[in-house]
Amino acid sequence: MANKKLLFTKKQIAEIMQKHPTPFHIYDEAGIRGNARQFKKAFSILPGFNEFFAVKALPNPFIMGILKEEGFGADCSSYPELLLAEKIGLQKENIMFSSNDTPATEYKKARDLGAIINLDDISHIPFLESAAGFPDLICLRFNPGPARKGNIIIGDPKEAKYGFTREQLFEGYRILQEKGIKRFGLHTMVISNELNPDFFIETAKMMFELATEIKEKLGIKLEFVNLGGGLGIPQKPEEKALDYDKLAAGIKKAYDEIIVKNNLDGIKIFMECGRVITGPYGYLVTTVLHLKHIYKEYVGCDACMANFMRPALYGAYHHITILGKENEPTTKMYDVTGSLCENNDKFAIDRPLPEVREGDILVIHDTGAHGHAMGFNYNGKLRSAELLLRENGEVIQIRRAETADDYFATLDFVSLEKFQ
Ligand code: LLP
């Protein structure tokens, strides 16, 4: 199988490891900035285009700060994510709050920040009103149900818990209109990690037609259509990256044919991508601790599923490079595992690799989105550090590794003594 490009050598990683022991995630600032600029340039052909980075993908304020500098807003899904957006100085309508099953406190925080609120369900209209009152600008999330097909990550729309049905959507806007709301948005998010631009162009058409119908039936001219995130990245070496220009041109064509033709010109286009913004620019670096030969050949690493769970959760392919063996033939077949008492704690199953030795350093690719963020503490595993390779070649720590004290931070050992 072809290889995937790596931005550092074994020697560079060995130097980094003198200060920062494995496992760690490392992000590439130049890669993130270069991609963000390309993304922005391509989609700026769409009226009022704005990208709200999906904070859930990489909730680190250093990275969010970089993306803010590149002109992105933030899409938040919880109270702590709203706090992160606030901490990096985002406010008002540069924050989108796309949550589901939302507690009142979170709506209050979103209101305090002046964020755009994206409602996930019709029952949240009265809930929001009594919890926090309505903001000026309200967005409703549409679930197209059987009209569209999703994938394993988001679920098939008709099986997915998100959003309003079509009927509820019209009813929702009508109720809000009655309550005096004047500014509206429309949102959907039907797929994640999709590489086919046509899928998103179809979604855009569906949304633009819906925007036209909303105008016809309710007299509402939407302020924006948020096409969600979901743009995929090439995780397998043979896969090709999405062509931003082609996708932007396809969406623009649909906009002209539907929105402009129906005299709705001016509706802004928003996106809230996570993966495509940072995913390819993150790597999990881990050391091989043990080799185990039983019915299969196992490579045991010092990282585990608690550091990166996408392969275990979705069966996702993430490429693995053994540093210093980039050009060696892949003559062996391994399961690459972590240390959890869970048999799905595997970064790869039946993966052809060059011969692995204890002490080898493995780099797991494409962990820059939904990577560290999805970490957890099962089996008392501690989450790793996050490092940033700056544009000038310097490496800085942007989150330290957890310690046992962090793991115990929510326990009260004084009460325990009294209790015993
Ligand atoms: N907006 C909303 C409302 C979302 O729910 C999501 C992802 C995004 C934006 C960003 O999607 P992206 O552009 O990153 O695909 N943990 C999964 C992905 C999460 C999907 C849920 N929502 C994974 O590791 O693949």
Image (cartoon, grey):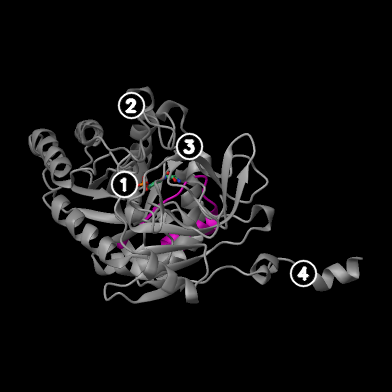
Query: Which of pointers 4 and 1 lies earlier in the amino acid sequence?
Result: 1
Amino acid under label 3?
Gly
Q: Is residue 105 magenta?
A: yes
Amino acid under label 4?
Asp
Of the two numbered discs 4 and 1 in the rendering, the one whose residue sits closer to the viewer? 1
Bin the neighbour count of mark 1 within 10 Å (Cα to Cα): few under 14, some 14-19, many 20 and up. few
Q: State how far apart marks 1 and 2 are (Cα).
A: 34 Å
Q: Is residue 37 left or right of residue 194?
A: left
Q: Secondary structure at mark 1?
A: loop
Compared to 367, does 405 lie above or below? Answer: below
Q: Is residue 230 magenta?
A: no
Q: State how far apart marks 4 and 3 are (Cα).
A: 38 Å
Residue 211 visible, this angle: no
Q: Are marks 4 and 1 in contact (CB under 8 Å)?
A: no
- Which residue, given by chain and number where applicable, does mark 1 sit on? 3
Query: Which of pointers 2 and 4 lies earlier in the amino acid sequence?
Result: 2
Residue reaching furthest to the top? 146
Q: Secondary structure at mark 4?
A: loop
Residue 65, image x and y in percent?
Answer: 34, 69
Between 367 and 6, the one nearer to me in the picture: 6
Bin the neighbour count of mark 4 within 10 Å (Cα to Cα): few under 14, some 14-19, many 20 and up. few
Residue 102 visible, this angle: yes
Asked where in the image residue 218 lies, by quadrant, the reply is top left
Of the two numbered discs 3 and 2 in the rendering, the one whose residue sits closer to the viewer? 3
- Which residue, given by chain and number where applicable, does mark 3 sit on? 315
Which range of residues does the magenta coloring cover? 94-111
Query: Which of pointers 1 and 2 lies earlier in the amino acid sequence?
Result: 1
Q: Quadrant of the C terminus?
A: bottom right
> Does any atom of ligand 1 lie closer than 8 Å to the CB of label 3?
no
Residue at point 35%, 72% (across, down)? 89
